Each structure stands twice: as C-alpha cells, then as structure tokens.
Image: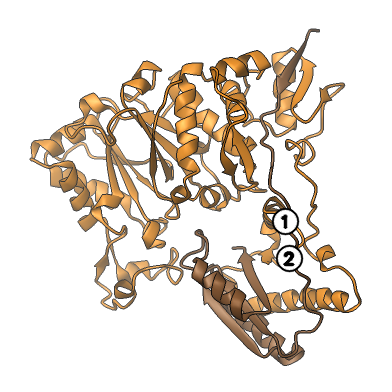
Amino acid sequence: MARIRVLSPVGVVARQSVAVPALPGDLAGRTVGFLDNTKSNFDRLTAGLGELLRERYGVKTVLHRRKANASTPAAPELIDELGKHCDLVFAGSAD
Amino acid sequence: MIATTAFQGLAVSELSALGVAGLPLLVIEHPLGGERPDAVARRSHQALEQLASLISGVGRGASHSVGAGGASTGRDVGGLSEKGGAPIGANTVSESELTLDDDALSILAEFSAREWCDGLPIVPPTAERVAAMLGGRDGATSLGAMPPLWRQATAEKLAVNAVMAGCEPAAFPIVLAAVEAMLDPTFNLYGVQATTHPVAPLLVVNGAYGRRVGLHAGSGCFGPGFRANATIGRAIRLILLNVGGAWPGRYDMATQGGPAKYAYCIAENEEASPWGPLRDGDTVTVYGGEGPHNVNDHVSTTASGILANVADTAVSLGSNVGWYFSQAQLMVVLGPEHARTIAGDGFTRADVQRFVYENARQPLSLMRLGGMYGMQDWPAWMNATTDPDARLPRVPSPDDIFVVVAGGSGKHSAVVPNCTFSRAVSRSIRPA
C-alpha cells in the first residue's frame, strides 16, 4: 500500500520553567494565606485547614482572600497583598 | 495548590505548562462542592496530612517537588509524548510529522488513537495541503499561547487543523480571525476550555467575505449541510483540542459537553435583518455559548409577544447567566419572520435589547433555590436586596444582549446563553 506523510496537528509549548522557592521546613510563627476560588465549600475547606495549621503547627496568622469569581484570574492587587504578607499561599483548582 | 482528584490531571499539566511544575499539589477527594460539613472537614485533614508530609520532607532535606503533584518538567514535544493513544502498526513518527498507510480507514484509526481528531474522518494534512492553506503566510508566526496547555498557536498548526477539518483555503482567514479573537483575554479561553460547563465558542460571521466562501445564514444554519459552516466550525474545535490541548475529561472538564463542540459557526442573515448587521464589515465574533435554546412562538403578532417568549427562554434556574454577573451576556438569534414582526412594531435593535434586559428576570425567591446562589459576584446593591419578589437583572446592561438575525422561514428563534465567564470578542477578517 502507498504511504503518506502528514504533519502533526499538535501545538508545541515554548514556555521556560521558573524556579519554585522551597517550602518552609517549619510553619511556627508563619503567616499562611488562602486564595479562595469561590467554588462551593472552598471557604469551609480552608477555614478548617487554617484552624488545623494554627493548632498543630503554630501558624501565627491565616489570611483568607476571595477572587471575584471562579473563572477569571485573581486581581493583581490581591496577589500582591498575599505575596507581601504570607510565607505560604494556597490556591485552589477544583469543583 | 489544592485540587480534587478529578482535577489533578488538569492541575499537574497546568503547573507544568506554566513552567512551575515544582509547586506542591495537595490532592483531596472529589467532589468538594455540595458536600456536607463533616465531609469537607475530612478533606481539610487530607490536605493537612499531605502538607505535613511535604514539610517533614523539607526538614529532612528532601526536595518538595516530589510531592503530591509529581508533575514532569519535560518539554511537550508536539504532544507525541503526552497523548494517550499508542501508535498503530509500523507507522513512524517524529516530533512534527507521521508516515502511515495512505488509506482512509487507517488514517482515521491512527488519528483517533493518537487523540488527534474529534472521532470523524479527516483530510490528511500533507505538507502540500498545509502550504496551500497557509497561502504564503509565515507558518512560524504565532498568534499566542493557547490554553489550557499553553501551546503556541502558530499559523502552521492552525493550517494543519484547518486542512484536517476540510476547510478550503479561502476559509482560513476566518479561522485565523476567530483564533485571534479567542486569544483576547476578554474571551477568557482558559475558562471556556477547562470548565465543567458545556460552553463552545460560537462564531457569528458578518460581511460579504463570509458569503463568498459559502457560509450559510438561512434555513437550518445551526445544523448540517453547509461545508463552510461545518468545516470552519470543526477547524476551531480541532484547534482547541490539538493546539490548546483541551481533551475531554482530562483538560476539558465539561461534565457532559454538547454537540456544539463539534462545530458552531453561522453567518448572520443580513439581508433579512431589519436592523443591519451585528458588526460592520468582514468580521467574526466569537461568543462562549451554550447550544441554541429554541424559542417557539407560532401565535404572537406583536413584538412584546415574541420577546416575552424570548425573555422566558433566556432565563432558568439552571442557567449560568447572571451568577458571574460581571461577565454575563446573552445572544438572541431571531428567525427572520420573528424579526420582521418585532420591527413591524417599531422596535429598534436597542429596543429589543432593552425589552429582553427588563423581562429576562426571575424573582429572588426562585434564584435562592439553587443554580450558583452563594457563589455569585453580584454588585453590593444586588446582594443587599432582600425582597423575595425582586426581579434582578441577569446581565449588567442591555448592551450585553446581542441581537442577531439568522435562519429561514418559520416561527422559531433561539437564545444562546453564555457561560458567564467569557465575553464576546470581534475581529476583522483579513484575506491574504
């Protein structure tokens, strides 16, 4: 049978990797932030997790901030604020 | 990052595509939404246990990048290393091309196995056909990175997919304009691609160029039978699958999806419109819509009668429209006979928009029963409203209601609700 050569339709990624800072080895006295994606129960999930981090790991401060809605990116000022005040920030991707 | 199990794959790929594969990922049971407090508390503990493990690993000197995420930092080589399908037989493959038996069924089997197509037969994208589609354009030029896997939308890759879809080269400028529009941040293509909602980009083409390439605006325009509508619409879907990487269930998280995801492209029936075109000139408008919802009105002889039916169809408790209020839009596609009756009562396009804006509403007491109540981004005045009979707007303004005329004879129109996290974008069509 004759052969045919076709081109791949799949796009190529051209993005470079960036270094990710290491997690702190100890959370005592640290500030932890949660970026709420507004999905149902994310607030409850992170309220519970924040409380556990205070009780068991000595986290000093927990900041909760909420995006405008689930499907658009967080406002830059929200990210700046969390970046400025927090040692560790959790974002969510979930339903 | 915290993700549920169903979204773990998307989260891992997203972190990798954004170049931050080393970010730790905490994976909790799916779903989170709709669970009772004790079940949510269990998930808080799941996240805590994983975090504890990562932190103790750091304390012992281990790298946290080997945590729950486990994302690869490898470069995506044209998707060949990533997609699930195994090559068939003795076919040879490289990063950018594939050699296989020149047989229609073998080609369909191979492309399906590689997850390179929508499941329907394709036109094999040979270098000659792709060059003809490009029409002298530089294939290396990229319109940008396409989500959710943030791969480059180069002209060559767009042309490959347009060939596969069966497009004629004359249709390619419409495909290019639509991709350019979808990559405008206003359209929020990431949300459109990755959401659980069944959204698909609807292309509405205005101008003489669309008619010259055969785009159909008359009877059955949303349905089959017209090559330009079918192949331009299909090219967009193949691009979203192959360039963006939105494979169903993995990166396109649509719970059920919908037939509009195969092909969704019409021209406006400008000759039948009493109000002129939606956009002037040769233009494509992309709109993140659900499939068309039918409006059957065989009896009304007035604008208010027909538009009352339109407004009623436009809102329902299960609709997305209105919850993400700041992004909410509606498209009303009037059949020519309905449009003529409405215009006969002296209604301008602005009057139609205003009527639908004022009447496509539901009482607050009903909205509290479900949908996305509690997740809305309503402005303060709406959130402060307590009257259960208050009928709150579902879109920010009458300008967020698009009025288009399309279709043939008959007493039907359609409403196309948007996914409410994507706003329509228009771009000029520029023939080579």
Q: Which of the 4 quarters of the picture holds residue B79?
A: top right
Q: Earlier in the sequence, mark 2 or mark 1?
A: 1
Q: Colour of chain A?
A: brown
Question: Which element type, helix, strand or loop, lies under badge 2?
Answer: loop
- For disc 2, the neighbor class at 10 Å (few under 14, some 14 to 19, many from 20) is many
Q: Mark 2 belongs to which subunit?
A: B
Task: Name the amino acid type tagged 1.
Answer: Val
Q: Is residue B36 visible to us here?
A: no
Quadrant of the frame with the N terminus of chain B: bottom right
Q: Which mark is residue A50?
A: none
**What separation in Å lies between label 2 and label 1 (alpha carbons)?**
8 Å
**Pointer 2: what residue?**
B25
Asked if marks 2 and 1 fall on the same chain, the answer is yes
- Residue tagged 1: B12
Image x and y of residue A9, in percent: 66, 29
Chain at tag 1: B
